[in-house]
Amino acid sequence: MRKYLSLFLAAVVSTQLFADEGMWLPSRIYERIADMQDKGFRLTAEDLYSVNQASLKDGIVHFGGGCTGELISPDGLLITNHHCGYGQIQAHSSVEHDYLTNGFWAMTRDQELPNPGLTVSFLVRMDDVTSQVLKGCKQGMSESDRSEIIKKNTDAIVEKAETEGIGYKAKVSPLYYGNQYFLFLYQVFSDVRLVGAPPSSIGKFGGDTDNWMWPRHTGDFSLFRIYADKDNNPAPYSEDNVPYKPKKFFSISVKGIEEGDFTLVYGFPGRTQEYILSDAVDYIANVSNPHKIALRTMRLDNQKAEMEKSPEVRIKYASKNASVANSWKKWQGEMKGILKMNTVAEKQKYEKAFTEWAKGNAEYETVIPEMKKIYGVLAEYNFAEDYHKEAVMAVEAASFAGRYVKSDAGARESLAKSFFKNYHMPIDKNIFVDMMTAYSNNVPEKFRPEYFNVQMEKYGTPEKWADAIFSSTVYTDKDRLSAATEEQLAEDPFVEYYNSFNDFYNREIKPVIAENSARLSLLYRTYMKGQMEFDREKAFYPDANSTLRIAYGHVKGYKPADAVYYKPSSTLEGIMQKDNPDIYDYNIPQVLRDVYAKKDYGRWEVNGTVPVCFIATNHTSGGNSGSPVIDAEGNLIGVNFDRVWEGTMSDIVFDPDVCRNIALDIRYALFVIDKVAGASHLIDEMVIVE
Ligand code: ARG
Ligand code: GLU
């Protein structure tokens, strides 16, 4: 019977885990270690994760909540991506000290710059606390009673764990949709100083043109240092603090990288959805992504048109444009990847086989049909929500007005300052017209607030509505805003816009989504458990949830299209081929041109050039930015920063043929620190394995 079942499974569904797919839990890595060693890894499970001795996890931090960073010296020196430190680099920049443009290098420790608000967290340990969390829960009890017990148990676990050490922060997170619960205990440091950043023309080389793409030549790194009190404990910023002595830091290998070499990425991926129903994938690939992409295309076109007219506007919108473009580009790759993988049909086949298997099993028999019913209800609400977020709230003046009017005097001042610093009204007005046009064409009547209909009735077209609202608002002009009375502020047409759309959304859309999503997530708990019983051959890894994970694979090129093969590593030659003083994204600093002309590469020279980036088969996601990429011996060989465009569907479905993570070759970072920045004192702190 067993044998028959697995044959049957192999024939109808392709669920077996492909070679390098998976984001594994560090505390359970012993379950994978034999496979990892087969593939070339030379360390043990204890070397990666241990609660008894220093292990590699002790050299890794969750950086600022959204990225990863790793320690590279006994004095608390940390490397992460340039795009992860971007906010800090920008915050220290001014016209006189433009660190974004020119880079920043602390030549002595007292030049290192503090960053209020920035924290880094080390994972102290992770524990399976499922039985403690579920203690007191009984079969058949109501879900609300159950969640109450879970909350009480969780709070107690967290509270106790946080007393264990200085700066400890605990979190209990569900894994496998609540089939398991894990405690994650962190030690949080808040004195983290900026040490170095290359100019953006290196750290962001290729900009949004090359973003999500291979071949890549971005020197995407920045350096920070963690400071602690004299007892090596976390402490708020103080001049008396001293560099933190980590339990573990990474040695750096400059031995070189070859296709086929083992690689491991150790970091904090944010969110994946590998086990969702075909209905959810169908919605993402065929409805949500296409609409969100179309809306963002209009926004980007409007920004670009004005940015090209004026260098001032280009600077104002550089960062906003980048963040709008980042998801816009990812969604396109993701959608194409899902369609190419035929994921909807594959999942439907899988669901059919699951349903066959579940016949007569009271726990699992109805779970898929029940979930499908909920997806049927949710689809139009999700669509309305997409338009609310991506169209209605894309109007900058509206979201500014909404936030401003609710804030107190102190907050208002800084809100206004940061808003007007980067605002260009003509862009916003054109976006308003495009967004309201798309809204009126695509959002069904029942999901539009009365307010919208009244305005359209009154003005006739989005253009005329735009003329009226932009000429009467006080929120698009600094002087008019500061001269406005409290009454004018509150009765402004953009406040009305913001409140009318939001009230409608909060009343008619959000609650339906919340209620159905809650029901759905309960059903996912059952479905996930069912999938694990249905397919016993498969090793299931929990979806990413911003907790520490290990992904392993190997350096490998890929074929993006017919007749094309991409090699796995890039070099300085490619930077020089792209170099163009007339194109913003490709205009490298003169010093790099000079170094290239003299071929002054020093110890970083490899075959007459310098390696820059490489790709590998590690399964990564957003949040893995800045993660250490290590070799078979555990030495640092790269810093993860992106994925290739053809593989961006890996948050939903992993294709071993094209899913690749992109890493900065650590040798390029060292070359830039040494030859471009002249900051070789930083290299002297590191341990380099030749
Ligand atoms: N795609 C990378 C990530 O998702 C890099 C983003 C920053 N770079 C940029 N050109 N926008 O974070
Ligand atoms: N750039 C992404 C980040 O900031 C990593 C790329 C990805 O999504 O894989 O985390």
Image (cartoon, rainbow, N blue to C red):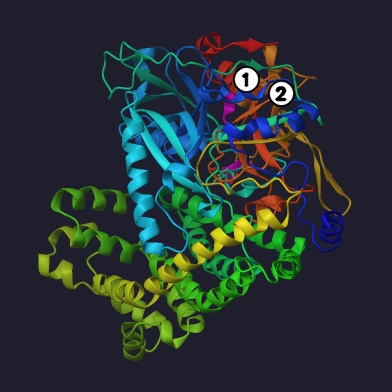
Would you identify the image quadrant in which residue 19 lies? top right
Quadrant for ligand 2 reads top right
Residue of label 2 = 610
Cβ atoms under marks 2 and 1 closer than 8 Å: yes
Which amino acid type corresponds to the residue marked 2 in the rendered image?
A: Val
Mark 2 vs mark 1: which is more N-terminal?
2
Give the quarter of the image for residue 509. Answer: bottom left
| Image quadrant in which the C terminus is located | top right
Residue at the image position 60 percent from the left and 62 percent from the top: 527
Q: Residue at x 13, y 61 (%)?
A: 483
Q: How many marks?
A: 2
- Mark yes or no: residue 600 visible: no
**Residue 273 is one of the magenta-drawn residues:** no
Q: Nearer the viewer, residue 398 or 165?
A: 165
Vertical comparison of 281 with 222: above or below: below
> Residue 477 bears which disc, if any?
none
Residue at 29% over, 22% down = 235
